[in-house]
Image (cartoon, rainbow, N blue to C red):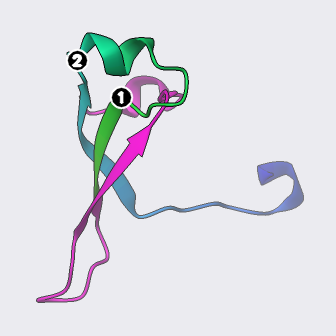
């Protein structure tokens, strides 16, 4: 996208990732055993600055900038 003059900025960073230890949940193909806590860097003062997301899997593709 940079070749087209576009820059993508997402002011959100993951603050933690946790994988369930529940065997039944891990074996269930319909479950979402990964818990990710996201931190919003541009949250207004006094506003909500985190979000918890449940996922089947997480892919990290931020190279050396990944903070955990």
Q: Does the residue at mark 1 contact the one at mark 2 (Cβ under 8 Å)?
A: yes
Q: Which of the two discs, 1 and 2, sits closer to the camera?
A: 2
Image position, residue 39 (x, y; %): 26, 59
Tag 2 or tag 1, which sits nearer the N-term? 2
The residue located at (32%, 76%) in the rendering is 42
The residues colored magenta run 39-68
Q: Which residue is mark 1?
A: 33
Residue 55 placement: quadrant: top left
Q: Which residue is mark 2?
A: 22
State the predominant SS element of the stretch in magenta: loop
Q: Is residue 23 above or below residue 10?
A: above
Within 10 Å of disc 1 (Cα), the crowding (few <14, some 14-19, many 20+) is many
Q: Residue at x 37, y 50 (%)?
A: 53
* Whole-percent x, y for residue 40 in the image: 30, 66
**How far is the residue under mark 1 from the one under mark 2?**
8 Å
Q: Is residue 61 magenta?
A: yes
């Amino acid at each position: 996208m940079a070749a087209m003059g576009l820059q993508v900025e997402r002011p959100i960073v993951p603050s933690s990732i946790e994988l369930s230890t529940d065997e039944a949940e891990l074996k269930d193909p319909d479950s979402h055993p990964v818990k990710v806590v996201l931190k919003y860097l541009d949250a207004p003062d006094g506003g909500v600055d985190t979000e918890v997301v449940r996922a089947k899997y997480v892919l990290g593709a931020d190279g050396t900038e990944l903070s955990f």
